[in-house]
Amino acid sequence: MPLSTRDVVGVLADNLRLRGSVLPISSRRATRWARDLSLPRGGETVLYTGTMYQLIPYIERLVRLEELLGDSRLARLSGLARRANRLVNAVAVVARPRPAEREEYDRVPANVARLLQLAGVEFGYLYEDDLYAGALAYDLGADEAVAAHARRIAGVFRAHGVREAITIDPHTTNMLRSVFPRLVEGYDVRVRSYLEVLADSSLPVRRKVGRGVVIHDSCVYARAEHVIEAPRHLLEAAGLDVGEPERSRAATWCCGGPAESLYPSKALAVASKRVEQLGEVAADCVTMCPICLVNLRKAANGRMSFRDISEYLLEASLGSDEARGPSPAPGTAPAAAPLARTW
Amino acid sequence: MTSGVLDPGLSDKLRQLGAFDAERCMSCGICTAICPMGISTLPRRVMRLAALGLEDEVRAQREAIFSCLLCRACEVSCPAGVHIADNVRLLRSWLLRGEL
């Protein structure tokens, strides 16, 4: 029996209202990725993470708990859990990912910051004011809580004098670029994905990666924000042979992630179907959304390798494996070409 | 279709929450054929129930409505240009009114 939609959405909306995120983690955890980068605070152009990648290890833990609770009699106590969560932040109590899990996902915003620096883009960071943008609560229909949260973020942008936000995931891009203008009067912040920014820049390539991969388009990037060509342009310039799966670009097949907070088994079925489609093209898949990354990895269960696009791009730009993560890469062996160029 | 309370004002209630446009649906069923979730009522039948104002019938589809991925695969194939994902999101907001 799935958990009550009323109680699950209620907890998420309560958290957004009371603690500024659907899954509140400390600002120390959310900003840890930036501690060695000496990024300037604020500025007219900021890198806005929306904490999406940083939240993924906590989401994974909570979904595992939900899968257990959904099949037990404890599911009937979800209303009680919601009331308790208003008093005590349940995420801090029940979701405790291991440091290695946190570090893997924290590496993505750090990768993006380094790529932007290599491309000569000047930007700041809002640190503890870099807030979750509210995508999950918005998608689930918690409109009042999301509207208030959007006004809060718009106020943060005004207070810091932010005129442009560079985002790192499709859901934050969509909220800041397409949803907030409908919710906040006078909102006029320019919003671009870092992929769009890099595609328009002169990011150096010091070593061609030389590997065959299959690309998985995020539904939100491809169909809502029309970010389709930029990632392909960047990957091909980095020396990757980009394969297209059965459903790609604007016809991409969902990773199932949006259903995970309420119906994890349904999400897994959709993700499994997508893994089959991707696996027919290559054993290494490049993703550009944290939700896609975690859901496809889980469905593949080690049969394929999934990596965030920032890792491939940084590997090519630095000419080293510095950005590569610990997960296995069962695909074709790399054949690096030592050719420097820019795009 | 089973018994239901016909409420011609349901569309108006949904439009107060946002740009609800399910009345444009031609009921061709392409959206249901392409939906990754494989739920028979999603999204065509849900759109029709809402457009017809069958409030009880819509409430009975609560799990289907909250199962939608909002992935918009249906939208890019819809010949009538219905904003299906936005409509589903508005139905969620309407279902949750008074519950949050």
Image: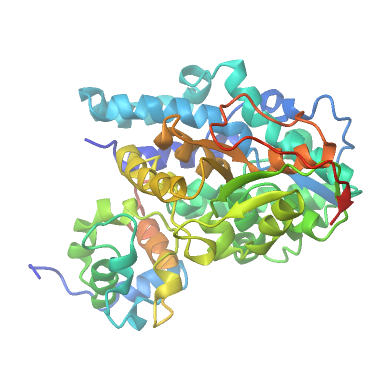
The residue lying at 33 percent from left, 61 percent from top is B35
The quadrant where residue A42 appears: top right
Residue A182, x across and y down, in percent:
60, 66
Task: Say above or below: A40 vs B80.
Answer: above
Quadrant where the C terminus of chain A sits is bottom right
Task: Write down the quadrant of residue A4 in the picture.
Answer: top left
Task: Answer whether residue A125 is visible to the viewer in this image.
Answer: no
With respect to residue A339, does B51 lie above or below?
below
Name the outermost residue toward the left: B2
Residue A40 higher or lower than B43, as above or below:
above
Residue appearing at x 39%, y 26% in the figure = A64
With B37 as the anchor, is A277 left or right in this view? Answer: right
Q: Nearer the viewer, residue B93 or A39?
A: A39
A325 displayed left or right of A24: right
Q: How is the image coloured?
A: rainbow
Q: Pinpoint residue A143: horizontal percent, then vertical percent.
A: 48, 55
Whether residue A166 sits left or right of residue A80 in the image: it is right
Name the residue located 64 percent from the left edge and 61 percent from the top edge.
A227
Q: B92 or A254, which lies in front?
A: A254
**Residue A148 visible somewhere in the drawing:** yes
Residue sitting nearer the eye, A30 or A315: A315
The mark total stands at 0
Q: Picture coordinates of residue A15 (x, y %)?
A: 51, 36
Residue A163 in the image, given as x and y percentages of width and height: 83, 57
Give the residue drawn at x 86%, y 46%.
A339
- Nearest the viewer among A187 and A64 is A64
Of the 4 image quadrants, the one containing the N terminus of chain A is top left
